[in-house]
């Protein structure tokens, strides 16, 4: 009787008018007997509009409605976390790439999910220690076609790499992670599924390579713009003009020393002539007037002046940002170093794509020594990719276990108070 009274109070709180103890087969939640109208009344219960996030999306047969109450403390914390996106273009680009990666991950999961072909889906098994919950292994479940490919793969590399190692190598599995990746791509039926797996295995799919190629062209254009700004052949050299402005500013400042240049002691006069192009050399003339040793004139020639003809495209964004900051066009200098070594990474991923395509075609006889070295590096990379997410999951579970051991809940000190404990929360329960 007491249980029924509590249930009645809970349902009356959410404005539910009628309820039947028998389970119904209709409505938004058939196991609980809640009708669609009652579910909408629960979802659209009064909340402060300025502190409520609402999201609706129609999936045809299903409708997703999300309404979340955000307290003032949590809203202030979110504004503090989002504030770098307002004044920093670097953080904004990183945030956009992060969100795009999440959306692309959801989109790419469709061809290899239940909606795809049967051969495009590869089951994945994880071995976990039941006592320590430690990750012990992870492997794919292959069909007969992929297993035969693995046998041919191992047969070839046993005959080639084992001879180089100087032993029979019968108990050794060569390039196991690379073999798994190539076997998965080999057994796919559709092109979309292959590209999804190429994206998973090191982002070597065509879309990623094309996007990086476009970014490379943009970096080359930026490098050309920076070079044009630094040294324009038609109007002279930019650094010379900048130096003249700085030198005039220094000459206009009052002397910081009590002794005048015409007094006793040593007088140093310097003349600096900056090169008009990369071929000329800088010339510095130093004249020393010493009372004890007489006049002495010495000239120094400095060769190898700065040339901007070979500006690396990967550094173009840094040069451009710092030049804009030096001119006063930007309040801060950019610290984005994500473009450094981007060209080298693109070239390496192209080689990896070409190597994987050759291995999928089983064109083993045309593998060069450099490609075998790339195969070893790619095998280690794929092994890391396969276990990285699993290791991160183990780390998160360990952190939660440590937090729950003493306090009893998994919330850190920076997280908000639970909703059911907030006195100002409209969702608080009885």
Image: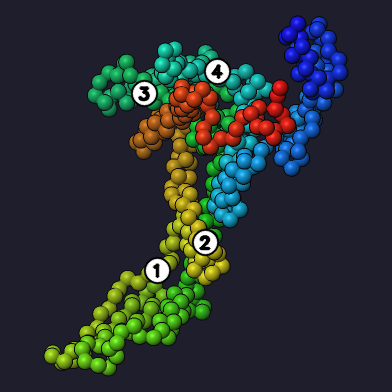
The x and y percentages for residue 298 are 22, 85
Q: Dots 4 and 2: beta carbons under 8 Å?
A: no
Residue 332 — which label? 2
Earlier in the chain: of badge 2 and badge 1, it is: 1
At label 1, counting other C-alpha atoms closer than 10 Å, the crowd grade (few under 14, some 14-19, many 20 or more) is: some
Relative horizontal placement of residue 42, taking residue 404 as reference (left or right): right
- Distance Cα–Cα, label 4 vs label 3: 22 Å
Residue at numbered disc 4: 123
Earlier in the chain: of badge 4 and badge 1, it is: 4
**Residue 211 visible, this angle:** no
- Distance Cα–Cα, label 3 vs label 2: 51 Å
In the foreground, 302 or 51: 51
In the foreground, 295 or 184: 295
The C terminus lies in quadrant: top right
Q: Nearer the viewer, mark 1 or mark 3?
A: 1
Q: Nearer the viewer, mark 4 or mark 3?
A: 4
The x and y percentages for residue 267 are 25, 88
Q: Nearer the viewer, mark 4 or mark 1?
A: 4
Earlier in the chain: of badge 3 and badge 2, it is: 3
Earlier in the chain: of badge 4 and badge 3, it is: 4
Residue for point 65% across, 20% down: 114
Residue for point 72% across, 38% down: 53
- Distance Cα–Cα, label 2 vs label 1: 26 Å
Residue 307 — which label? 1
Relative horizontal placement of residue 355, taking residue 376 as reference (left or right): right
Residue for point 85% across, 22% down: 37
Mark 4, secondary structure of its residue = loop
């Amino acid at each position: 009787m007491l249980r029924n009274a509590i249930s009645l109070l809970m349902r009356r709180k959410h404005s539910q008018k009628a309820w039947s103890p028998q389970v119904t087969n209709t409505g938004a939640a058939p196991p609980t007997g809640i009708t669609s109208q009652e579910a909408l009344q629960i979802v659209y219960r009064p909340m402060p509009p300025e502190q409520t996030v609402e999201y609706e999306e129609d999936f045809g047969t299903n409708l997703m409605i999300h309404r979340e109450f955000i307290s003032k403390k949590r809203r202030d914390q979110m504004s503090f976390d989002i504030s770098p996106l307002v004044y920093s273009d670097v953080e904004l680009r990183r945030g956009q790439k992060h969100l795009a990666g999440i959306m692309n991950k959801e989109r790419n999961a469709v061809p290899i999910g239940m909606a795809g072909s049967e051969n495009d889906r590869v089951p994945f098994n994880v071995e976990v220690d039941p006592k320590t919950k430690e990750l012990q292994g992870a492997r794919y479940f292959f069909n007969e076609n992929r297993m035969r490919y693995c046998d041919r793969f191992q047969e070839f590399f046993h005959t080639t790499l084992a001879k180089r190692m100087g032993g029979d190598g019968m108990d050794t599995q060569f390039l196991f992670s690379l073999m798994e990746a190539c076997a998965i791509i080999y057994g796919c039926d559709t092109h979309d599924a292959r590209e999804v797996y190429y994206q998973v295995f090191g982002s070597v799919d065509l879309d990623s390579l094309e996007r990086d190629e476009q970014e490379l062209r943009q970096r080359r254009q930026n490098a050309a713009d920076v070079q044009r700004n630094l040294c324009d052949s038609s109007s002279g050299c930019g650094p010379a003009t900048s130096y003249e402005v700085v030198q005039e500013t220094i000459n206009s400042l009052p002397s910081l020393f009590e002794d005048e240049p015409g007094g006793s002691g040593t007088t140093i006069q310097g003349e600096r002539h900056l090169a008009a192009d990369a071929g000329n050399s800088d010339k510095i003339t130093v004249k020393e007037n010493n009372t004890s040793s007489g006049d002495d004139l010495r000239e120094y020639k400095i060769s190898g002046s700065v040339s901007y003809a070979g500006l690396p495209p990967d550094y173009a964004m840094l040069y451009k940002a710092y030049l804009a900051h030096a001119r006063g066009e930007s309040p801060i200098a950019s610290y984005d170093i994500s473009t450094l070594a981007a060209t080298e990474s693109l070239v390496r991923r192209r080689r990896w794509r070409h190597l994987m395509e050759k291995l999928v075609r089983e064109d083993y006889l045309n593998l060069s020594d450099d490609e075998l070295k790339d195969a070893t590096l790619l095998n280690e990379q794929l092994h890391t990719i396969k276990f990285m997410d699993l290791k991160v999951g183990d780390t998160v579970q360990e952190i939660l276990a440590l937090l729950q051991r003493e306090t009893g809940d998994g919330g850190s000190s920076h997280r908000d108070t639970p909703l059911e404990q907030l006195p100002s929360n409209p969702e608080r329960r009885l």
